Image: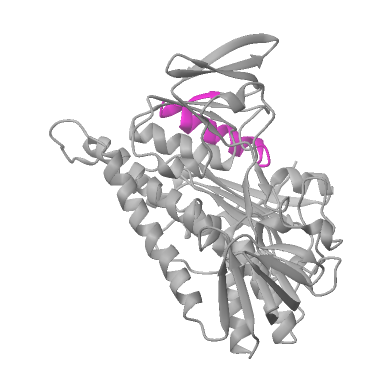
Amino acid sequence: MPNFDAIIIGTGQSGPALARRLVAAGWKVAIIERKLFGGTCINTGCTPTKTLLASAHAAHLARRAADYGVRIEGSVNVDMKAIKARKDAIVAASHNGIERSLKTLQGCTVYQGHGRFVAEKKVAVNDSELTADHIFLNVGARAAIPPIPGLDQVPYLTNSSMMDIDFLPTHLVILGGSYVGLEFAQMYRRFGSEVTVIELGPRLISREDADVSQAVADFLNDEGINVRVDSKVVGAEKQGNSIAVKVESGGKLANVVGTQVLVAAGRRPNTDDLGLDRTGIVTDARGYIQVDDQLHTNVSGVWAMGDCNGRGAFTHTSWNDFEIVAANLLDNDQRRVSDRITAYALYTDPPLGRGGMTEAEVRKTGKPALISTLAMEDVSRAYENGETKGFMKILVDRDSKQILGASFLGLAGDEVIHCILDIMYAKAPYTVIQRAMHIHPTVSEFIPTMMDDLKPLQ
């Protein structure tokens, strides 16, 4: 029975980085991967989708070339096989690099197979049983499949199986109007598909402020995407070579008929076949492993990192989980999950960059606050680039003068948000950035100007 100092299950963002730190500290490490090295981000998430979005953006710009005084003779054609091949090559480089680096890492033993607990400090993989005093779970998450009658009888797609498509769907029907669904919606519309988005809630991306949701819906509609909100999917069935999705909205039933259906209705953790019942590790009702502020589970010597712990669903939160665990274990640096500020992006075009609290969350606190907004059409860089959709919004605590949050929906919003995040992490008053001199012409140069125009949040 091989004995290690540490066992890491999963090779997403947290696992490989932690393996390297532990080995460097002299630990004997085993790392287990059941399928694809690199986890969701590299194989079915950030890397492939942003690569595909880049191709979709190129097609979109080519069709808009005349707006910039550039003439393209003939139609713009999209080669889906070439687009997929480009995506596959980029994914393979990252995937293979992680696999190679782990398999050549001195002090680290790689096991390829499904790892599961057989006892509190014992993990079985293939024909081996491994033991360690320290076990780290980095098992990720997968698409959640809602209990829709008939859905299991039709060939639906998820964010993972979408990666295998090398053809253009005639009509892509997307179940779910949140982050994953909207990125695929705009992407495939720009490739040339008819696209319908069906959202159960009253608006898209419901965790965002209503003005953000509406602005996103507006530019998706402008591109010809059919957005249906307040719509409950109550059934699905084959209809010849197509799929009919039965939708209930306003007390009425209707069929939306498409050639392919993408289920983008949330995520679920990969914890149901991990043998957690052999350990006493506590999960919540949805299967997420419960952890404390330093990512310990309730079982001594076991930590959970990344998507499976329910403390963040992003590559950057998983990486930060690794940093927290490593700092506490190896550096005597008491880092905590609660120290980090909410931050993420929606990679539509234009993108949404979010940091801190939404306007709705600020209002719920009841604290006096200040707000400033600016339309992207008033930003010179956006106007010059012909990318004027969206707006920027910043919220400030009136008394402490600290920034509470921001939503930047517009050109480079996913990058500009870091100006705000850095000030928030420094716990500096907004006046620091108000007095900063930013470079012209950029989107960021308008942040100090916005600080000059703060008004009471009514």
Question: Horizontal placement of 52 versus 41: left or right?
Answer: left
Q: Quadrant of residue 139?
A: bottom right
Say left or right for 261 vs 58.
right
Q: Position of residue 102 (x, y in %)?
A: 50, 75
Structure colour scheme? one colour
Residue at the spot 85% in from the left edge and 57% down from the top edge:
282
User: Residue lying farthest front?
Assistant: 127
Does residue 4 appear left or right of residue 298 in this picture? left
Give the position of the C terminus as an image quadrant.
top right
Write the residue at 41% across / 39% down. Answer: 187
Along the line of sight, which residue is nearer the eye, 90 or 184?
A: 90
Residue 216 in percent (x, y) is at 53, 36
In the image, residue 392 above or below residue 38: above
Q: With respect to residue 92, does 286 lie above or below?
A: above
Quarter of the image where one finds residue 72: top left
Q: Answer whether residue 311 is visible to the viewer in this image.
A: no
Query: In the displayed structure, would residue 436 be above or below residue 21?
Result: above
Q: Residue 211 lies in magenta, yes or no?
A: yes
Where is residue 26? Give x, y as percent.
63, 91
Q: Could one spot residue 141 in this view of the protein?
A: yes
Give the residue drawn at x 65%, y 87%.
27
Specify the segment rendered in magenta: 206-227
